[in-house]
Image (tube, coloured by chain):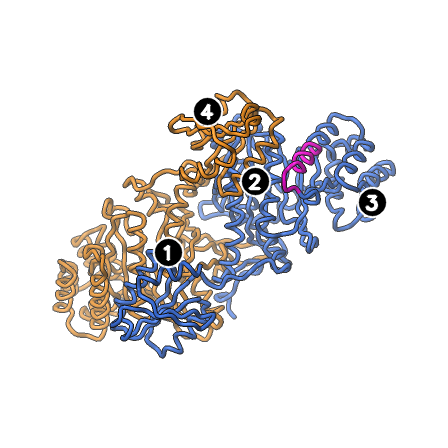
Chain colours: A orange, B blue
Amino acid sequence: MSDKGRLLSGFQDFLPSAMLTRNRVIETVKSVYSRFGFLPQETPTLEYASLLLGKYGDNQKLVYEFKDRGGRELAMRYDLTVPLGRIIEMYGNSLIFPYRRFQIGMVWRADKPGKGRYREFMQMDADIVGDDSLLSDLEILQMNLEIMNALKVRATIRINSRNILEALLEAGKLEKSDGLKMLRVIDKFDKIGSSGVYSELSDLGFSEDVLALVQSYLAIEGDNAKVLNSLKELLGDSPSFNAGYLRLSSIVDTLSGLADADPNRIKVDPSIARGLDYYTGLVFETVFLDDPAFGSICSGGRYDQMAKRSNGEALPTIGMSIGLDRLFAAMSVAGLVSPVETTTKVFIVNFSDQYLLRYISLAKTLRDAGVSVEISSKATKIGKQLGLANSKGIPFVVLLGENEIDSGKVIIRDMKTGLQNEISAEGLIPFLKAKD
Amino acid sequence: MSDKGRLLSGFQDFLPSAMLTRNRVIETVKSVYSRFGFLPQETPTLEYASLLLGKYGDNQKLVYEFKDRGGRELAMRYDLTVPLGRIIEMYGNSLIFPYRRFQIGMVWRADKPGKGRYREFMQMDADIVGDDSLLSDLEILQMNLEIMNALKVRATIRINSRNILEALLEAGKLEKSDGLKMLRVIDKFDKIGSSGVYSELSDLGFSEDVLALVQSYLAIEGDNAKVLNSLKELLGDSPSFNAGYLRLSSIVDTLSGLADADPNRIKVDPSIARGLDYYTGLVFETVFLDDPAFGSICSGGRYDQMAKRSNGEALPTIGMSIGLDRLFAAMSVAGLVSPVETTTKVFIVNFSDQYLLRYISLAKTLRDAGVSVEISSKATKIGKQLGLANSKGIPFVVLLGENEIDSGKVIIRDMKTGLQNEISAEGLIPFLKAKD
């Protein structure tokens, strides 16, 4: 096949059934964001490449960059966080803080395509800018829980704090750059395990003392109270530790105080570090319990130094990001996605083009009442038209031939049961609404 | 300001209020498409550049093209029609025809930005593939009318047929390439008038006879019946003419037979030609009556030779495209856009962080009932918190202080009237629903 008819590797076409099914998930997320008082925002696909420069560490090479005909260096959106930073810088003086915005949109990464991993994929982010309160941490986590509930996804949010990780680095007497290196290795704990972390850190030249400290740190487990206590025993009483400990304890206490709280949904986990440099407080990842191998389906954290007004004033921010394509892949594997074939409710059979005006008028009445209708475009044999309606998955067929037109009635056929009813044209809408 | 904090020229940021207002228009269009039995489809932002090659005539240079790190020649989506062609070529054997799909998405053109003209803008397309019936022409036009009605936009759809234009070219004894040149000049009639068309055609070397013919053709006016008759007198009785005449007459007759038909909404207009080469039948443009200078806000036509299965079989298609940004600009000028500030209904005042759990629980109850809620993150002075709710445009504020907690009641304040009611927590949801 020529390039003409080819889809780029790592990119996706969404035909109607895929699209309708996917839209249900998107609408659910949107609806939860909106009920939590978040408002939509959108930024362009293209930005000046300089905006994205130096923001993604080793992943910088995954940014799609190019020069336009005017010689401008452009880059395609790599995430929704850096554009949020630009929004705050540009419009910070007219926005009202705390600024609760969500953004749902595609991002592009020139990555190797794989299971649930695409070069174009959808992120659904929500952030609260200009607020360092405990409440905002709680709301982001609770919103995460509500979304998983609404989607019937069994998941656990694993939380930690960069302050606690900082206390670990302090206890290990590490320089900042060494510290970041170590966090990136700890972040791989899930994939490579304790021994993997140990050997990578050893290869990087960390001392025996540090290795022993990390080993003790990663060995901490138990319920939330026990983990928090063990962390306190190990990392003692520094200002960093206390800040992290206090915030995590408050989060755990408040969330477990909610009426329908499930203590297994939020888990303090020392191994959560998050790769990006900009986090400053709470960090979290959400594990899909039915298949943890999918990695995190919703992650985020607090970054109090990245979003800045044009005068340089930093605005404390907490945010979360859902990777729709990964979430959707995970849900599909777990059988949580019920396919939607069509939204069209009624198919009107065409007995003859001489009745076209009748069909169009009837369709208009139904459509005005919010019913989705397709009219059969050709007066082929009735059986063939019923077959077409059936293959399209349209649940009801209306038959309006000469007899019915004379009698002022229509026949409605339920395609699932094959049952037909003769009813008045006025009775059609109540009949269909009752079947909703 | 450095590039860091700059938006690219011709691109747009949508802050929440702009986004919410714009989303209303998008939702209206989506809802009409859906009620007409169209289903959503999506294609990637990036395609192989070869797919777009030679598709846009003189505008080819407006395509954003670049090479990725793997050396692939890529192009950004320029419209939604060419990707539809690829969909039909790739999936034609599994799709069910007539295939009624809509696609709403951004397209990119390296054009000079201007009034309502952007480099990244949204198109909302609906097409019926695999159907050459009169009905499908009618449905597309009627859908266009319904959308304009739903948006309260006063508009007229100007229709013509490529078959009639073909008869004009035949009458002028023109070669195909000269014919296309002529159509592109006729297409400018609105901007440059009869004399402009005359002089451009003269400059291009068309004969006096042809000029006289075009002048007579463009001078045709009157109601639809009169225009159709005059066309018949001028262009006689060729197969092309008859095909176009029959289809346009049937369209006009059927649409005027509808109960609430307004004869001024559909106008046969010989000057409508459409610049693109691929049209084969009905062509149309929609003029915004309050400010025709905006150009066409919805246009399209029938193209029976472009969408092809992989075996080369052409599938007759009719489609329409709405340029959201232009439509939105036109609606704004006409005062048809009522700004939406927020979707958040309730702001819960924070009297003290010791009541956080109460606030979160109350918010949860409201959110579970579908009410959008923001909790105030800081227990600052009440007046300050009310001011914040007010500046965010949130219509209701809930006050739940020590007294209310003791009494099991809450105070709800209508921010518009300033009136406060003390009601039970259970009464809150019915109270708010009644205010919807």
Query: What is the quadrant of the C terminus of chain A in the image?
Result: top left
Given residues B216 and A371, the one toward you in this image is A371
| Amino acid, disc 3 | Tyr
Residue extent of the magenta highlight: B248-261
Q: Is residue B1 magenta?
A: no
Instruction: Tell me, yes or no, whether the two marked residues, 3 and 2, touch with CB atoms within 8 Å.
Output: no
Among numbered discs 1 and 3, the one appearing first in the sequence? 3
Please rate how many residues cluster around mark 3, counting C-alpha atoms within 10 Å: few if below 14, some from 14 to 19, many from 20. Answer: many
Residue at mark 4:
A387
Residue beneath label 1, please? Answer: B370
Disc 3 element: helix
Q: Are marks 1 and 3 on the same chain?
A: yes
> Rounded to the nearest whole Å, what is the CA distance between mark 1 and mark 3?
62 Å
Which residue appears farthest toward the front when viewing the image? A407
Q: Nearer the viewer, mark 1 or mark 2?
A: 1
Quadrant of the image occupied by residue A333: top left
User: Mark 4 and mark 2 in contact (Cβ < 8 Å)?
Assistant: no
Q: Which residue is mark 2?
A: B81
Amino acid type, callout 2: Thr
Q: Nearer the viewer, mark 2 or mark 4?
A: 4
Q: Residue at x 46, y 38 (%)?
A: A7
Using the numbered discs, state the Cα–Cα distance from disc 2 to disc 4 in whole angstroms: 29 Å
| Above or below A133: residue B299 | above
